[in-house]
Amino acid sequence: MVEHQHVATDETRSLIAASKVEGTDLYNSQGESMGSIYDVMLDKRSGRVAYAIASIGGFLGMGADYHPVPWERLRYDTQLGGYQLDETIDRLKAAPTIPSDYASDSDWGSTDLGWRGRVDDYYRPVI
Amino acid sequence: MVEHQHVATDETRSLIAASKVEGTDLYNSQGESMGSIYDVMLDKRSGRVAYAIASIGGFLGMGADYHPVPWERLRYDTQLGGYQLDETIDRLKAAPTIPSDYASDSDWGSTDLGWRGRVDDYYRPVI
């Protein structure tokens, strides 16, 4: 019974609400703020969380740039209370962006801008 | 080049923004409205989209019940402009719920209520 409880707790603790991810701060590996997570992109086919959309710059929600970042590159840091991405702010600023209206296009929130390959290339580890 | 374009388009069209899923209508297989999708739960460990949180009933955003539904049970219907779930409204109403403050607990949006097993059991296909 105790073992069962333990398993159940572990399992449910592994979930996070997308609404909670949205608005969470984004830090570099030095703990310096780079912006925040604005949205999450889901892969309809694989059922995987594909990208976090990082919101950088802007003022009062206007004029920010939206940078898709591969989800698996983010680590949540409980001390900072936000996600860490092992990139400098300059490299993140130079990363591929998507238009601010990416979620409101006619294809019902699907994006069709060919950015996926560019984003994956940009964040591909150097071997 | 044409082939490459085709592949790239396919790939990006496979993405959907979580912010776009939130608020989308939920229908049964007869096309009758059952409520809407309120949120999405992500599995931090596997990187998969685990559950949609269906919001049923309520008024002006108050008093609704929140039912986690396994993500793979939902199909998007372009005619209806919403998700379809092959369950009756009565069976959805009787399905496990989670508290409305599920995303604001102290464990930073993780849930710890042991509901995951109950939800999976409820929606498990009858063999």
Image: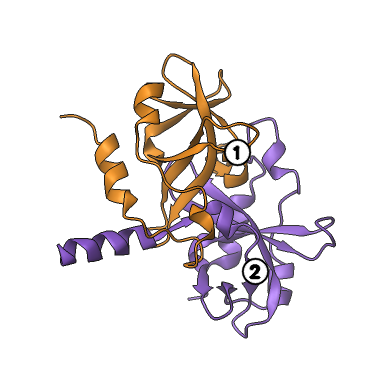
Chain colours: A purple, B orange
**Mark 1 and mark 2 in contact (Cβ < 8 Å)?**
no
Q: CA distance from mark 2 to mark 1?
A: 28 Å
Q: Is residue B47 left or right of residue A122?
A: left
Q: Looking at the rendering, which quadrant does residue B47 occupy? A: bottom left
Looking at the image, which is closer to me, A47 or B6?
A47
Q: Please, is residue B14 above or below residue B87 in the view?
A: below
Q: Position of residue B70 (x, y in %)?
A: 37, 40
Q: Secondary structure at mark 2?
A: strand
Q: Residue pushed farthest bottom?
A: A30
Can you tell which of label 2 and label 1 is closer to the viewer? 1
Task: Determine the residue positioned at 63% across, 78% down.
Answer: A28
Q: Is residue A15 visible?
A: yes
Task: Determine the residue positioned at 31% across, 43% down.
Answer: B119
Q: Position of residue A27 (x, y in %)?
A: 63, 75
Q: Chain of mark 1?
A: B
Q: Secondary structure at mark 1?
A: loop
Q: Position of residue B104 (x, y in %)?
A: 54, 59
Q: Is residue B7 visible?
A: no
Q: Is residue B52 left or right of residue B86?
A: right
Q: Please, is residue B10 above or below residue A63 in the view?
A: above
Q: Position of residue B42 (x, y in %)?
A: 45, 53
Residue wearing tag 2: A25
The kind of residue tagged 1 is Met
Q: Which mark is residue B62?
A: 1
Task: Determine the residue positioned at 37% across, 23% down.
Answer: B90
Looking at the image, which is closer to me, A106 or A126?
A106
- Total marks shown come to 2
